[in-house]
Amino acid sequence: MKTTHAGMKIPNGEFGVLVEDLVKALDLFKVLAQEKGELLGFLEPMKKNIVETL
């Protein structure tokens, strides 16, 4: 993840918007809370490798 996103200058706010949009899509398709939680749980540790402090 870090190599792939290096130099993209993705701020914390944009990562948050991605998560919000993902949650909306999961809700739209009625993904169960447990599965939704698992997916979001995988994303959180990746955040430090995606978001760049500007």
Image (cartoon, helix red, strand yellow):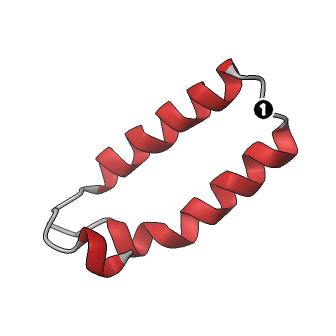
- Picture layout, residue 50 above or below residue 39: below
Task: Indicate the position of residue 53 as horizontal and vertical percent values.
Answer: 21, 69
Q: Residue furthest bottom?
A: 3
Direction from residue 11 to residue 23 in the image, left or right? right
Tell me if residue 23 comes above or below residue 3 in the rendering: above
Is residue 29 rendered to the left or right of residue 52?
right
Q: Quadrant of residue 52?
A: bottom left
In the picture, the quarter occupied by the C terminus is bottom left
**Residue at horizontal 26 percent and vertical 69 percent from the top:** 5
Q: Secondary structure at mark 1?
A: loop
Please rate how many residues cluster around mark 1, counting C-alpha atoms within 10 Å: few if below 14, some from 14 to 19, many from 20.
Answer: few
Relative to 51, is 29 on the left or the right? right
- Label 1 belongs to which residue? 31
Q: Residue at x 78, y 32 (%)?
A: 31
Quarter holding the N terminus? Answer: bottom left
Q: Position of residue 26 (x, y in %)?
A: 66, 31
Depth order, front residue of 18/11? 18
The quadrant in which residue 51 appears is bottom left
In this picture, is 21 found above or below 40?
above
Q: Residue furthest top?
A: 28
At a point 21% along the width and 74% down the height, the residue shown is 6
Label 1 amino acid?
Answer: Val
Residue positioned 55% across, 72% down in the render: 45
User: Residue 41, percent across and down?
Assistant: 68, 61
Total labels: the figure holds: 1
Q: Residue 48: where, in percent of width, then height?
A: 41, 74
